[in-house]
Structures are given as C-alpha cells and as structure tokens.
C-alpha cells in the first residue's frame, strides 16, 4: 500500500476522536488496520499541512505524554493548549490520565451468523 493510502486511513481514524479525548499512536495504527506501525502515524502527522482539519492534537504517546515538540518547534505547547481548551487535564508531570481521557471507540456489533 502506498503511503498516501495509509495516511488517509490514519487521518480518517484521527478525525473520529471526539473533542476532550485523546488516542495513542499505537491505537490509531491498530484502528487504521496497521497494527505495530505507530511510527507510521507519526510520519502521517508530520506530513499534515498547517491548515489541515485533522485534529492532530488529540494524538499522544502510550504514556499519555505529548511528543510533537520533537517534530514541530513549540508543537507540544500548541497541542497542550488545544487539549486544555477541550477539557483534557494534565498532571504535574505533564501526563494525561489515559484511563480517563483516552478515546474508546464503540466496538462493531457482530450480526448473528456473521
């Protein structure tokens, strides 16, 4: 699969994350059908245009920390501000309580016989 196709699958998942919730890179990869490819999610996010409507700020690492400061200067500051505006809280160490704020998409219902 070409990177553009993977990226669109990743962006489609990220667009589903509601305001006030976050998802991890690995979680996004899994939901996009790319298990074990959390880094691919990071690459896709770094390829976004500045005016993108993809809510990139809702993606955090597996420890509930922001990781964009390494890729985008001051990106972690902007990400934190956006998340706080949505009601996401950080502890004194700058972590988000994933147990409270992680997005859990509804599981697809199985149909009888399917």
Image: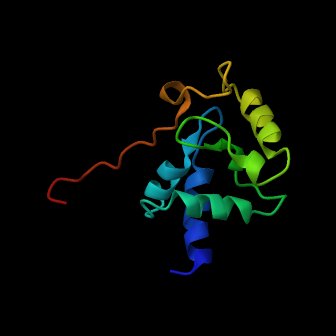
List x then y, in percent, for residue 82: 77, 36
- Res 40 → quadrant: bottom right
Quadrant of the image containing the C terminus: bottom left
Q: Nearer the viewer, residue 89 or 37?
A: 37
List x then y, in percent, for residue 110: 25, 51
- Res 113 → quadrant: bottom left
Q: Nearer the viewer, residue 109 or 44?
A: 44
Specify the farthest residue to the bottom: 2
Q: Is residue 85 above or below residue 36?
A: above
Q: Residue at x 57, y 75 (%)?
A: 5
What is the count of numbered marks? 0
Picture colour scheme? rainbow
Q: Residue at x 45, y 64 (%)?
A: 34
Q: Nearer the viewer, residue 103 or 89?
A: 89
Q: Residue at x 52, y 38 (%)?
A: 103
- Res 67 → quadrant: top right
Is 53 left, or right, of 23 in this rendering?
right
Is 67 left, or right, of 49 in this rendering?
left
Q: Is residue 14 above or below residue 19?
A: below
Q: Residue at x 23, y 53 (%)?
A: 111
Is 24 left, or right, of 53 in this rendering?
left
List x then y, in percent, for residue 14: 60, 52
List x then y, in percent, for residue 16: 57, 49
Specify the farthest residue to the left: 113
């Amino acid at each position: 699969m070409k990177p553009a196709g993977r990226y669109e699958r990743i962006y489609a998942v990220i667009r589903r994350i509601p305001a006030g919730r976050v998802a991890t890179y690995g979680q996004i990869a899994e939901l996009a059908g790319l298990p074990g490819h959390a880094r691919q999610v990071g690459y896709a996010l770094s390829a976004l245009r500045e005016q993108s409507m993809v809510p990139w700020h809702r993606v955090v690492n597996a420890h509930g920390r922001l990781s964009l400061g390494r890729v985008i200067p001051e990106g972690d500051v902007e990400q934190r501000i956006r998340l706080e505006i949505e009601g996401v809280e950080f502890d004194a160490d700058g972590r988000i309580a994933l147990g409270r704020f992680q997005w859990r998409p509804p599981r697809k219902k199985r149909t009888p016989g399917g």
